[in-house]
């Protein structure tokens, strides 16, 4: 809709084809129904790609402030919630209606719901065939997203078209997704489902190293919450993750200083910095230390080991919760086959790819929407009259 509205308002004839029964479902459900529509701190540093410089041009050409101006022109109230994340005061439906009205201003035609069965190219003209009849065009924009949340109609359509026309595809996989563990390994922690706390989570080494200070959530199958969703985009199968369960605290020093003459139980002491359920379960399963021991009776060596285990919990996920629980897809059309200013395929004139279908994946917090708007605008501005 962003690309279509920009092109239409430039005077181009545009038809928007969508196979879905309902418009913009991913916008509708985002941000708990209030749409985290951008992040004011957006820079290229918040995006993952095999070609990390690719996103620079589009992001510079259409900034969060530009989208905020559009939102405000449509009278939509908004607020900043957390770390630059912007949400509608009301409903995400307002963003959908805004984009619909922008398309209307550009006299965009719609075919929805309408599936496309085949795309072929002959003499620089694309032919789209489907049950609604053929469409002939010299310029074709693929804005069909990735495979995350297939229950909303997400598919790999754009990737199939890219391969059809000889473009390379960076292997896709779920991103911003919960991590899962072996059922037997995780059984002691399954009882903590629903417990949440702020942690520092890390994975990778060298250039692939990543770290996030965010909230973690225990689930029946593994770990979720913003910290885990963020690190999942960097995690590779077989790699461990490292979690500091008491960030910004010198736990060893705190425990040793609290020890002399302290008749308090260890689990009670830990419960002052942690949720009580976590303190009890951690002592029972992870540390091997009885929570009922009095602080004064515990050897310094044991307290040091306990602090070290809390600051450096290492575990290896067996996988992710998959596309059904992922917020986005990582990977996609290889950006080295695209022009970074226009989103056009370098070797297939008239063929464009934008948004999530491209190998540009943002962090959690409005960055992926900003990439959608920015890449859509870059493409809409580049399309020529035919």
Image (spheres, grey):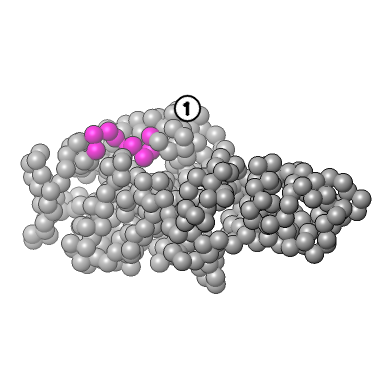
Q: Residue at x 25, y 62 (%)?
A: 345
Name the residue that disc number 1 marks.
Answer: 90
Camera-nearest residue between 87 and 155:
155
Assign the N terminus to one quadrant of the image: top left
Give the percent coordinates (x, y) of residue 106.
26, 37
In the picture, measured across the screen, residue 277 lies left or right of residue 205, that is: right
Residue 163 vs 292, above or below: the answer is: below
Q: Residue at x 33, y 43 (%)?
A: 2
In the picture, measured across the screen, residue 53 lies left or right of residue 349, that is: right
**Quadrant location of residue 49?**
bottom left
In the picture, measured across the screen, residue 115 lies left or right of residue 77, that is: left
Give the percent coordinates (x, y) of residue 263.
87, 46
Camera-nearest residue between 324 and 44:
324
Q: Residue at x 68, y 46 (%)?
A: 280
Q: Which span is picked out in magenta?
A: 20-28
Task: Confirm whether the magenta stretch covers residue 300.
Answer: no
Q: Residue at x 40, y 46 (%)?
A: 325
| Number of numbered tags placed on the structure image | 1
Give the percent coordinates (x, y) of residue 334.
32, 64
In the picture, measured across the screen, residue 363 lies left or right of residue 290, that is: left
Asked if residue 293 can be seen in this view, the reply is yes
Local secondary structure at mark 1: loop
Asked if residue 102 can be seen in this view, the reply is no
């Amino acid at each position: 809709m962003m690309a279509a509205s920009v092109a239409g308002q430039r005077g181009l004839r545009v038809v928007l084809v969508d196979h879905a029964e309902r418009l913009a479902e991913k916008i509708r459900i985002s941000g708990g129904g209030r749409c985290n529509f951008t992040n004011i701190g957006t820079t290229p540093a918040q995006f993952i790609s095999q070609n990390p410089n690719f996103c620079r041009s589009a992001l510079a050409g259409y900034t969060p402030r530009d989208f905020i101006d559009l939102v405000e022109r449509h009278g939509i109230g908004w607020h900043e919630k957390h770390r630059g994340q912007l949400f509608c005061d009301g409903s995400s439906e307002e963003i959908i209606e805004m984009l619909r009205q922008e398309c209307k201003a550009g006299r965009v035609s719609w075919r929805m719901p309408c599936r496309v069965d085949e795309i072929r190219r002959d003499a620089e003209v694309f032919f789209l065939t489907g049950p609604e009849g053929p469409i002939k065009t010299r310029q074709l924009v693929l804005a069909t997203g990735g495979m995350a949340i297939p229950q909303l109609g997400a598919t790999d359509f754009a990737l199939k078209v890219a391969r059809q026309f000889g473009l390379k595809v960076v292997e896709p996989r779920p991103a911003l997704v919960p991590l899962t563990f072996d059922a037997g390994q995780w059984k002691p922690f399954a009882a903590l489902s629903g417990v949440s706390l702020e942690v520092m989570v890390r994975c990778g080494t060298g250039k692939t190293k990543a770290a996030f200070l965010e909230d973690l959530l225990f689930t029946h199958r593994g770990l979720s919450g913003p910290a885990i969703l963020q690190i999942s985009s960097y995690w590779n199968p077989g790699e461990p993750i490292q979690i500091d369960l008491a960030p910004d605290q010198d736990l060893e020093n705190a425990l040793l200083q609290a020890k002399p003459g302290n008749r308090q139980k260890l689990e009670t002491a830990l419960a002052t910095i942690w949720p009580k359920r976590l303190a009890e379960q951690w002592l029972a399963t992870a540390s091997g230390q009885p929570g009922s021991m009095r602080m004064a009776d515990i050897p310094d060596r044991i307290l040091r080991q306990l602090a070290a285990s809390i600051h450096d919990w290492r575990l290896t996920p067996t996988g992710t919760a998959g596309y059904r629980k992922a917020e986005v897809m990582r990977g996609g059309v290889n950006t080295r086959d695209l022009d970074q200013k226009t989103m056009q395929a370098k070797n297939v004139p008239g063929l464009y790819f934008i948004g999530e279908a491209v190998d540009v994946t943002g962090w959690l917090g409005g960055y992926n929407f900003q990439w959608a708007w920015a890449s859509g605008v870059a493409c809409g501005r580049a399309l020529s009259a035919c």
